[in-house]
Structure formats: structure tokens, C-alpha cells
Amino acid sequence: MNRSGWHLLVEHVRRQRSTTVRLAGWSALEALPAMASGALLARALDQGFLAQRPLAGLGWLTGFALTMLIGAFATRQMFPHLAATVEPLRDALLHRLVDARLTTAVAHPDGTDAADAARLTNLAEDTRRLVTALLRTLRPLVFKLLAALIGVTALAPAVALLTLPPLLLALMLSTALLSAAARRQRAVLLGEEEIARIAGTTVASIRDVLACAADQRALAHIDRAIEAHARSAARLAWFVSLRTLIITIGGHLPPLALLAAAPWLVSHHSLTTGQIIGALSYLSATLVPALSSLVATIGSRGLELGVVLRRISEATPSTAECNSEAPSERSRGLHAPDLSLHDLTFAYGPHAAPVLQHVDLKVPHGDHLAIVGASGIGKSTLAQLLAGTQRPQSGHVLLGGTALTELPAHTVRTAIAVIPQQAYVFSGTLRENITYLNPQAPEPDIAASVDAVGLRPLVERIGGYDVQLGPEGHQLSSGERQLITLARAHLSPASIVILDEATCHLDPLAEARAERAFAARPGTLIVIAHRLTSAARARRVLVLSEGSYAFGTHAQLVRDSAHYADLVGHFDAAHMRKEAAVSPCQPAVCAVQEPSVALGKS
């Protein structure tokens, strides 16, 4: 498992290949003055001023000024590509961290640390800040260094052979120190987190600390963390000083060597005065400053970025870990994804009356179940228990024969999709909202889900999948939000979909179309019914009443359950015959006229 963290950056660059290529192209153009400066200065001297041709010399210098303008233009063109590289990285890392913390919170609800979650989330912003700084400083330094190396080698190969080895040696020695410096940089960052953790815990428990007269002990605990951090910072400063000394010595040797060897180069290699001055300008104006800044930047912000990326990698599952719980493997582990309740009892408090008591229920894979009942009877509570977001006081909820509490949280969240009454649409494109539970969905599958739930008119009206939604984008009605969440669930890999009054803002025809789409979809459909027409369309119905429940087909319950018969007792037969004709139901149900009465919400 890769815990260095740099693979996160490599993955992002791979996804942003086109943006990276454009960024590199403008960077190369930005480095043009560094590559041309020494050569143009040499020609200005040799073919201009030293040859008593001042106009020619001015012409070469004018050419150098033009390269400066080109470089400035390239710098100006760089910023949109910098933003296009950095901002998606921050968003991707933030999504990764939040997803990891939520998964941990679901799996270990009693072991989460809000302060730790906040600190880890801040790492995404730290990454954005550091990557931005490196792209603005390290990127031009690298390109200038390469450009100057090309320039001095083309101008005077003998000078390159004489002066470049000391520079490269200094670079190699500084690089060798980076590993040790990185360990000390990591110790500094971990020390800061430890101070924040201890101080946060102490402040949060200050009443207990004072009540136990443990204030001096708590202060000593914080002092030890601060002293450890100070020692780590001192060791890091020592390595930084050593690296700076190496670069200083390595940077001063090449210009001195060039000046000392100038007579020999002129006599034995026929170098001109202009070439000597041009090579010296490459060294003093570009190579040595660029190398010094490069090493300093890598040794400070580069090290810090490496440590931050490693912390993100440690705090979130790697790609391999995620793939180890791929949906197909999880589904195989579940055998048959039947959903069942065994002697389930649930209350909202130890002294509260049970909302559900001794419920036994089996929902076979591929079933279509409607849950109905009066307002406040526990329909939504039962949906939460079936989805594993609530835990019963007694009894078990089984998925594929295994208790939900014994399955990995990611397995449950992938197998079961719950669409609540309050549809959640986040700021982003319509495509991002639809594919949230299945980001790799191919275009034909997206189109099929959109058409199945009736979202196509909205897609066409707002102008396609890439339109922005949310506060700064297209505003949606409650019904449109529900259609988007329905398409999201329909496209998801979930084998069980629970619609918890998720169609209450749709008209009866749109609701019927959505429910038919989910009924035709492979897997299990559970509907918390807002209208009794949903119960009439279902294969089986669970009706909840005070202290009891009944289970069967719509026709059986009308005949055998007085409570259910009372719910459907007030209906308009003509209206329901018309609705049944528009929305065909199961053969066993079609003999029953569908009621138009709407149920209360719970």
C-alpha cells in the first residue's frame, strides 16, 4: 500500500493530462528569455559593440527584449491553467477526506473525533495552498534551469563541461538530505497535530480537569508536547542550514571556475569575449539563482506538501483498499441480497414507548414492497432500520443472511440506496448530481435512467447535463429535485432501493412512472407510500397500525385487515379506474380499484 502520498498528486495529474500539457507548453515559452539571454548577449558583444557596430548590438539586445515580452505574455496566459489544475485537486482531496471521515463515523459512531476530522479536512486546503505555491515558483524554476542548461551548452560546450559538474554535485548532495529532512518535517507536522489534539481535549474537559485538581498535570502534558515539537523544529532547521550551505558553495564555484579558466578557454578553445560574458550571465543570472531557489523551495514547501499528502493518504483508503470492496465482490459475499427483520423492536429512548415492536418481515430479492400507515406510525423509522442508519433495541436486520451491524459500512451503503422525502441536490453540474452514486457510469446508462424516471424534459429545458445547479446555478423546484435524486438512485449499483416518500412532490402520473421504472429495475424496491396508489402497484404491502402490523397483497389486506380497509375505504372508483388504466399494476392487484386518498407523512 502506497503511503507516500505523492500517488494522489500523480493520479490527479493523469486525470488532468490536457491541462497539464497546456501548462507545460506555456511554461516552456515563459522560459524563452532564460534560454536566449546569454546567446543574444554574446552576439550583441561579438557582432555589435566589440566589432564597432553599435546598431547591430542594439538590435540583438532588442531581440532579447522581445523574448522578455513573449515570456511575460506566457506568464499571463498561465494563470487560468494554474486554476484549472489546482482547484479540482482541492475538491477531489476534500471529497476523499470527507468520504473517509463519514465512513469512519458510520462504522465507529462512538470513536470519531470532531477536532481530528476538522484538522484532516484542513489538509485539503493546505494542499491547494502548497500546490499553488509550487506551481507558481517551482515550475518556472525548473523550466528556467533546463532552458539555461540548453543555452550554455549550445553557446559554449567547454564552459558547460567545466561549470555544470559542481552545480550537479551540489544538487545531488542537497537531494540526498531531503529524505532525512522529510522525516523531520513530518515530525514537526505531527507535533503540531498532537499539540492541537491535547489542547483541544483539555479545553473540552476543563470542568473535569479543574474538578479533579488536575490543572498542573494537564499543563505538564501540553508542555511535553510543545517541547517535543520544538526539538523536531530545531532538528529540521539544522538540516535546512546544511542544505543551504551546500548550495551556496556549489553555486559560487562555477562562476569562479569560469573566470579563472577564461584565458585558457580563449586560447585553447577559441572562445570569444562575448561567449565568456554570455556563459557567465547564464551562470550568475539564471543557473545559480534558479538552482538555489529550486532546492530551497523543494526543501520547504515541497517537503511540507509531501508530508501533507502522506497524512491524507494515511487518513483515507487507498485505491487498492477501495477496490478490495468493489461492488461485485461485495455482492458475491452477500450471496442472495434478501432483506429481513427478526423480532425487531425499536424505541427512540430507553423510557419511550416502542415505535415498532416484535416485527418479523422478509423481503426477498426482487420484491416490490409498499409500507403504509397513518402519520407518525413509524414508516420512516422502519425505512431507517432497513437501511441500517438506525439500530434496533432488540432483534436484527439481515442483508443476505448477515446482520447489518456485522457488514462493512461501505458494503451496506453500496447495497442499499435510500431516497428521503427531502431531496438533496448539491452545487455542481446535473451530471455530477445524477452520477454521484455511480461516477463511472457510461453515457447510455445515464440516458436510460434519466428517461426511465422522467427527467429528460428537465435535462432538455435547462440545456444538458453540464449545467450548474445550486446557489450559483440553475434553481430547481421540489419536484425537479426529487426527479434528480430518483435518477441518481436508479443509476446506482444498489440492489435495494428504499423510496421514503421520495415522490411526494410529483403528480400521480409522474409518481407512477417513477415507481414503474424502479419496479422494472433489477433488485428490490421498498416504497414508503404517500398515496395508496403506490400500495396498489406493489407486489406486497406492509400496513402499520398502533401496536400491530399486517402483511400481504393489496387484495388480501383489503379483505382481511380492518385497518387497511379503513385506509382505502374513501375512494373515487371512477377516478381510480382511470388511474389504473394509465398506470398498469401487478395482475394480482389490478382487480382491486385503486384509492385516491393520500396518507399522512411520518
Image (cartoon, helix red, strand yellow):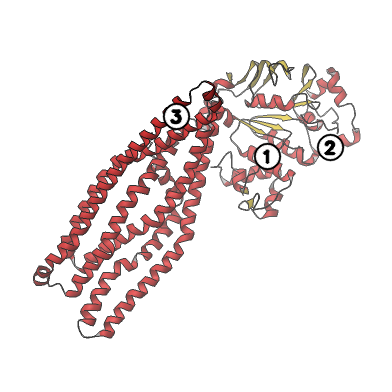
Residue 244 percent coordinates (x, y) = 26, 51
Q: Are marks 3 and 1 in contact (CB under 8 Å)?
A: no
- In three-dimensional space, the C-alpha distance between marks 1 and 2, rounded to whole angstroms, equals 22 Å
Q: Mark 2 or mark 3, which is nearer to you? A: 3
Residue type at mark 2?
Glu
Circle 2 residues within 10 Å: few <14, some 14–19, many ≥20: some
Horizontally, residue 3 falls left or right of residue 367, namely: left
Give the total number of marks visible in the rendering: 3
User: Does 137 sit above or below residue 572?
Assistant: below
Q: Which callout, 2 or 3, points at the residue further toward the start of the chain?
A: 3
Residue 304 percent coordinates (x, y) = 38, 44
Among the 4 quarters of the image, the one containing residue 373 = top right
In the rendered image, the quadrant that contains the N terminus is top left
Q: Which callout, 1 or 2, points at the residue further toward the start of the chain?
A: 1
Residue 73 percent coordinates (x, y) = 43, 68
In the rendered image, the quadrant that contains the C terminus is top right
Horizontally, residue 138 falls left or right of residue 393, namely: left
Which disc, if any, is residue 579?
2
Q: Nearer the viewer, residue 3 or 194?
A: 194
Q: Nearer the viewer, residue 43 or 504?
A: 43
Residue type at mark 1?
Leu
The answer to whether one can see residue 410 in this image is no
Q: What residue is rendered at 24% in x and 63% in y?
A: 283
Q: Nearer the viewer, residue 448 or 499?
A: 499
Residue on which disc 1 sits: 486
Q: What residue is rendered at 46% in x and 51% in y?
A: 16
Which disc, if any, is residue 219?
3
- In three-dimensional space, the C-alpha distance between marks 3 and 1, rounded to whole angstroms, equals 54 Å
